[in-house]
Amino acid sequence: MFGKYKALWGKQPSFNSSYDAVIIGGGLHGLAAAYFLARNHGMTNVAVLENKFIGFGGAGRNTAIVRANQRTQENLPLYKEALDMWPILTRELDFNLMFNNCGNLNLAHSQAAIKAMRLQVATAQFHGIDSRLIGPEECKELVPALDISDRPRYPIAGGMFHPPGGVLRHDAVVWGLAKGAAKHGVHIHQGTEVTGIGVEKGRIVSVDTNQGKIHTPRVLNAAGGYSAGISYSLLNIRLPISVLTIQAMVTQPLKPLLNHVVSSGAYHCYANQTLKGEIATGAHMDPWPNYTTQNTANYIKHQAEALTEFLPCLAGVKFMRCWSGLADMTPDMAPIIDGNDTIEGYYMNCGWGYFGFKSAAVTGKYMADFMKTGECPDILKPFNLKRYQNNRLMGETAALMSYSANN
Ligand SMILES: Cc1cc2nc3c(=O)[nH]c(=O)nc-3n(C[C@H](O)[C@H](O)[C@H](O)COP(=O)(O)OP(=O)(O)OC[C@H]3O[C@@H](n4cnc5c(N)ncnc54)[C@H](O)[C@@H]3O)c2cc1C
C-alpha cells in the first residue's frame, strides 16, 4: 500500500479512517508537533502524512546549524529555548542527535556590519544569550585558518561569537523524532500525499489522500516548501511565501581545521567541519523562485571562490557532493504559525525559510499545545499571519541583509 517507503523506525501502522489530528508533512516540524502531541498531551490518535519519505524535504537536506542569537525580541525567546532543548531532547528520545555545541562565528567585513552586530549582540545579551563582539585577532585565535590580512576582497573587521550554538545531525533529528512519535502511538504514513482538505460549516472534517479519505477535526499544514501551494490550492488561503532553492555541498575529508561554524554575509557563505572531516558549506538562496532541487555550476564556483577568500588553506580541496532543497521564504524571514479565523481546526506552521531546523523541536512543542487547546501560546503569537496585513513585519531580514549569512 505504501509503495517503496518502509517504516524503518518500527512496524508499519494501519491506515485508519479517522484520527484526532492529521499533520501534513513528515519533516522536522510535522514530526515534532506529532511527537509532542502524543508525549505531552496524550493525544496519540495522530497521523503524520508524508508524500515521499520522512526527511525528504528541507529536514533531510539542511546543514543543521543551530544558534539562538537572532535579532528580534519576538524571535529570541523561541530560538533560545530551541537551543537549550537539544541535550534534553537527546536524553528524552534516547537517540543520539549528535549535538556539537562548537560555537558560531559570524564574520563582519565592514564597520557598518560591526554596528549591526553590536545591536544584535546587545539584544541577545538582554535575553540572557551568550553572544559577543570580537576583533579580528580573536577571530583568528578561534579559527587559526582565517585570513585576517588585507588580502581578501572583504577583509575581516571583526565578528560576533556565539559559543553555545553549533550543529547536529539532521537525519538523526528526523529519525529520533519519528521513533519517539511512533513509540507514543503516532501513525506515520509515508508515500501518502494529501490531495484535499474537507471543510464543513467552517470546520475541518477530513483530508483526502492518495490512500483514501481520513476523517479528522484538526489539520496542521507543515509541508515546508509545499505549504503555500497546499494552502492555496486546497483551501484558497494565500500565504506570502516564495519558494527558493538553497544549495549546499561538502568537500573531501580533511584533518581538523575548523572548530566552529564560520559564516560571512558579505561572501554569502558559511562552513563547518563535520565529524567525518568534510567541510560542509552552504550559502545564499537562488535569487529566483523555483521548485527545482538542482545544483548549478555558478553556485559551485561561487562557493569555492568565497570559501577560499577567508579560508585560503582550502584552495585545491575537492567538493565531493552537492545537493539542494526548497526554502519557504516569507517577506520578513520569520515563520507563519497560526490557526484560521474562518476554518476551525486548521493550523499552519510554515514559512521557515532557512531557519527551520534550529527551531523545529521547540516549535513542535508549542504547536502541540496550540492544537490541543486551540489557544495560541504567547511565544508563538508574534508569528501570526495577520502581521502582514497589519504592517507588523519582523526585523530578521534586516539582520541578515546587513551582515549575516543564511544559517
Ligand atoms: C540546503 C539547506 C540548508 C539549510 N540549512 C539550515 C541550517 O543550517 N539551519 C536551519 O535552521 N535551517 C536550515 N535550512 C532550513 C530547514 O531545512 C527548513 O526550514 C526545515 O527543513 C523546514 O522543515 P519543515 O518540517 O517545515 O519542512 P520540510 O522538512 O521540507 O518537510 C515538509 C514535508 O512535507 C511533505 N509534503 C509536501 N507536500 C505534501 C503533501 N501534499 N502531502 C503530504 N506530504 C507533503 C514533503 O515531502 C516534505 O517531506 C536549510 C535548508 C536547506 C535546503
Image (cartoon, rainbow, N blue to C red):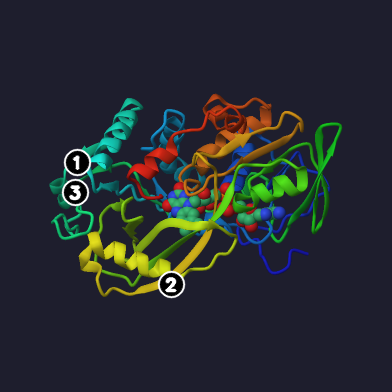
Residue identified by numbered label 2: 297
User: Any mark on residue 139, and which?
Assistant: 3
Give the residue at mark 1.
134
Within 10 Å of disc 1 (Cα), the crowding (few <14, some 14-19, many 20+) is some
Tell me the CA gap for discs 1 and 3: 7 Å
Q: Are marks 1 and 3 in contact (CB under 8 Å)?
A: yes
The kind of secondary structure element at disc 1 is strand
On the question of residue 217 being in view, the answer is: yes
Quarter where residue 381 is shown: top right
Q: Left of 317 or right of it: where is 395?
A: right
Q: What kind of residue is marked 1?
A: Ile
Question: In the displayed structure, does residue 354 sit left or right of residue 182?
Answer: left
Q: Earlier in the sequence, mark 3 or mark 2?
A: 3
Q: Where in the figure is residue 406, as x and y percent of width and height?
A: 41, 50
Q: Are marks 3 and 2 in contact (CB under 8 Å)?
A: no
Q: Secondary structure at mark 2?
A: helix
Which residue is more in the foreground, 226 or 186? 226
Dot 2 alpha-carbon crowd within 10 angstroms: few under 14, some 14 to 19, many 20 or more: few
